[in-house]
Amino acid sequence: MTRSDQVFESAAEMFRVMSAPMRLKIISSLCHGEKNVGQLLAEIGTTQPNMSQHLNTLYRSGVLGKRRDGVQIYYRIINERVVGVCRAMCDEVAV
């Protein structure tokens, strides 16, 4: 696999991860700082199982990090490149 093939594969994976509107909402919410699942649910209208599924996808893909504090799990963005791409795309679509 050539270097350019690797770049295209990585870009396609990033777009796959960001292809769900719910994941874009989660990324947007976490741009304002770390939040636990309850805070995300209060801000984004969905069910807890659906939220958990999307958070898990974002975590496994390296977009989010998480930490446990007692029974709460807090999520934060650890891949700022995804945030930049998300903002650029949403800004472009909004115009």
Image: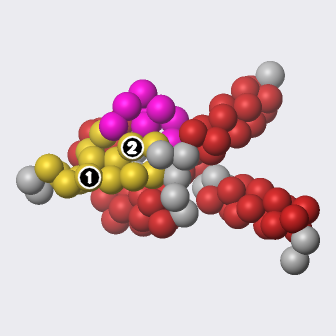
> Label 2: which residue?
76
Q: Are marks 1 and 2 in contact (CB under 8 Å)?
A: yes
Could you tell whether 54 is left or right of 13 in the image?
A: left
Q: Between residue 20 and residue 33, name the one nearer to us.
A: 33
Identify which amino acid the numbered label 1 is placed on: Arg
Q: Which mark is residue 82?
A: none
> What percent of the width, then of the height, locates residue 90?
70, 33
| SS type, badge 1 | strand
Identify which amino acid the numbered label 2 is placed on: Arg
In the image as oriented, which residue stretches furthest toward the top? 95
In the image as oriented, which residue stretches furthest toward the bottom? 1
Among the 4 quarters of the image, the one containing residue 12: bottom right
Which region is colored magenta?
27-34
Residue visible at 81% across and 67% down? 6
Above or below 28: residue 2: below
> Label 1: which residue?
67
Q: Between residue 1 and residue 81, name the one nearer to us.
A: 1
